[in-house]
Amino acid sequence: METQEETEDSEVDVQKTPGNPSLKYIFDDIQRRGASKPKKESPKKKSGSLWQEKKFPPVKRRIVSFKTVTPMKKHPTHPPVEYSFASDYKDQPQVNLILFTTVETRKVHFECNPHLQKTIEYNVANHIRMLSLFQREYSFRGVVFTSSPCIIRFCKHMNVTVIDHYLTNPYNMPLVRDLFQQAFHAFRADFYGYVNSDVIIDISIFSLLKDVQRRVDRKEFPRVVEVAGRVYDSRNYLPMDPSSKESFKKYLARCMRRTTQLRNQDSADYFIFSRVFPFGDMVDAVVGRLKIDNYLLSLMYWKNGALVDATHRVVAVHLGLDGYMVKRLWKRQKKEDQNWNCEYVPHMYVVKGSLNYARWRPPAGKGSV
């Protein structure tokens, strides 16, 4: 009995003193044989809802309240501006569509000195040619917001209206509310829209607007309507021939043969609103920065309007492969400048700021490329 007790005590001592050099070979032998710490027995699986709740707890979802998605007033806002209608507003014939854009010449560095660009980029020139063609062939008026002398001269040559003053934020980016307000008070139209200055739109936009107006008259849509669409990136760098609709169709078909991809459904490059939309209710969002498209798309959520996704009915092309994410790398924008619009769309999917929430997606039809 004493011998057995001594043996048990010695085993206990061996386990308590692993640092003893004389007993090192014992621990090495134990590890080689896989006799390390005993494994804990896994509990038997039980059936029932209680087990499922413990093993797979419900996902904790963050509930976003109405106050969270309401625009936060962090940026200094412009004082209210009183807009007056043009003197000949009542005498003007009411056109079907007013489409406007904004563009400025950028500074180029030559011999370490910044100079204003004296030439117009090919995509901007083609866009102005498109506006000129639409004015001749359809019930349409194009407007360009710019203060650049060379762009103003080119617009006058193409008989396109120019407005050289507009409100901006501290980083000289145009306020989208001011652009719509000026266009609305200057010209009479059924629809008012903004489009990026490097985008070409198919002529089927006019037939689509007629279809939308018919649905509004039949009360299938509310009076507040927005038509928006995505674009294809194209590698076509040739000038456009705006002499006729046939030459324009050939140019757009050539652009479509050199496209790379269709942009995602969370983005859009043109936004057309019905006349009854309250443009004065827009916030101080700016064009040319992140989430401006999501903000403009979310307006149908706030105003209980109808959003129409015209992507497949109206072919639109972005001339060039340099999108905003590429441009901001070499423009060296400040963080507050880049994220100016983010506070107005803190939760894109909560406020339905995407074409995924469109009420109507007309398929490709007559008049499209």
Image (cartoon, helix red, strand yellow):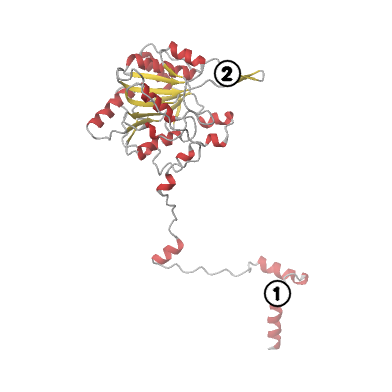
Residue 291, position in %: x, y? 46, 36
User: Sequence order check: which comes first, mark 2 or mark 1?
Assistant: 1
Say above or below: 37 vs 234: below
Residue 40, position in %: x, y? 55, 69
Q: Which label was assigned to residue 16?
A: 1
- Depth check: 131 or 357 in front? 131
- Depth check: 11 or 109 in front? 109
The part of the image, by quadrant, that contains residue 191 is top left
Mark in front: 2 vs 1:
2
How many residues crowd around disc 1 within 10 Å: few (fewer than 14), some, or many (20 or more)?
few
How many residues crowd around disc 2 within 10 Å: few (fewer than 14), some, or many (20 or more)?
some
The quarter of the rendered structure image containing the N terminus is bottom right
- Determine which residue is flagged by label 2: 116
Say above or below: 102 vs 35: above
The quarter of the rendered structure image containing the C terminus is top left
Q: Which amino acid does label 1 sit on?
A: Lys
